Image (cartoon, rainbow, N blue to C red):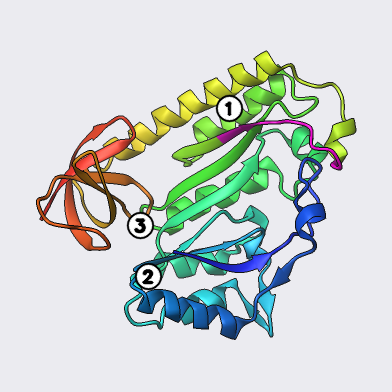
Amino acid sequence: ANLKIQDGCNYYCSFCIIPTVRGRARSRTFADIIREARELVEFGHRELVITGVNLGTYKNDGKRLLQVISELEKIDGLARIRISSIEPTTIGEELVRYMASSEKLVPYLHLPLQSGDDRILKEMKRKHTIAAFSKFIEWAAKTVPDVGIGADIMVGFPGEGEDEFLHTKEALTDLPIYYFHVFSYSDRPGTKSVDLKPKVDPQTKKARARKLLDLSTRKKRAFYENHVGDTVSVLFEDNEHGYWTGHTGNYMKVQVTSSQTLHNQILPVRLIETRGDTLFGEIL
C-alpha cells in the first residue's frame, strides 16, 4: 500500500510543471502518517511504499524521512518498508547506512537521474552532476548488500546532441543501475524548457529511447541471472496466468506455481531460471 507523506516541490526543474500545478513542498504531520500506517497494517498490508512528489524533503516538527521510517519499523505486522522515487540529493549517507542494517527497510532505490551529461543537467536545472551522482550510487551499491537500483531517464531534451546522449548511455552502462524508466521529452506549456533550442526531432527521440530500453533489458537480465540459485524472500501479490507473482525486497519480479493461495504471503523461494523480465522459482 502507498503511504503518501509529502506533496509539492520547490525544485523547479526546467521541464517540470509540478511546482506550478501541485504547489510548493509541504509535509503531512508526523502523527497523521503513523496513524494511517497503523490503519493500513491493521487492514492487512504487509508492505508500505513511502511516496511523495519530493519525499526526501519531508520535514515536520523536526522530523525528517529517516525518523518516519524508524517509527514505521516499530509497527507490529509490518514486514516491509519501501522508498519510492527519491531525489539523489535528498537521500544522505545516514539513510543509506540505515537501509544497510534495517530489517524492514528494503534494499531498493529509484532515482531520477534524467541525463548523464552535465550540460543537459544544468539546462534541466537539476541539482546534481553526473560525477556526484555516480560517486553516490557506487558507494550505495557497496554499502547496501544486494541493493536494487533503478533510475528515470529523459531522452530528447532540447539541445541533446549525439555526444550528450552517448554520455548518458555510457553512464547507464557503467553504473550499478539494473533497470531504468525511459521518457521522451515533450514541451509542457508553462515550463522554462519550452523556450530552449534546438528541439530534437521525434524520430531521434524514439531511436534513443529504444537504445536505452534495450540496454535496460540487458542489464535487468544480467542482474536477475546473477541471482539464479539464490534463496530470496518474496511478497506474493497476484496470480498471473496460473503463476503466483511477487517481488523481492530489491524489486526483482518472481513467479512460482502453487495450488495454494499465496496472496499477501512472504515466503522463501529458490530461484531457478530467468524468462524475459521474470525470475522463476520454487517455494521452499
Horizontal arrangement in the rendering, residue 3 relative to residue 260 (left or right): right
Query: What mark, if any, has residue 169 been given in the picture?
Result: 1
Pointer 2 with pointer 3, Cβ within 8 A = no
* 30 horizontally vs 225: left or right: right
Along the viewing direction, whichever of 153 and 98 lies nearer the viewer: 153
Mark 2 or mark 3: name the one nearer the start of the chain: 2
Where's residue 176, x and y in %?
Answer: 47, 41
Please state which of the two labelled residues, at mark 2 or mark 1, is closer to the viewer: 2
Q: Residues within 10 Å of mark 3 (few under 14, many from 20)?
A: many
User: Over which residues does the magenta segment extend?
Assistant: 182-191
Mark 1 residue crowding within 10 angstroms, few (<14) / some (14–19) / many (20+): some
Q: CA distance from mark 2 to mark 3?
A: 9 Å
Q: Quadrant of residue 30?
A: bottom right
Q: Position of residue 23 (x, y in %)?
A: 79, 61
From what the image shows, is residue 40 above or below residue 259? below
Task: Report the amino acid beneath label 3.
Answer: Gly
Q: Main secondary structure of the magenta part?
A: loop
Residue 230 in the image, given as x and y percentages of width and height: 20, 48
User: Residue tagged by mark 3?
Assistant: 249
Instruction: Residue 158 in the image: state x and y as whole percent.
Output: 79, 27
Residue 104's label in the rendered image is: 2
Q: Say what secondary structure mark 2 lies in.
A: loop
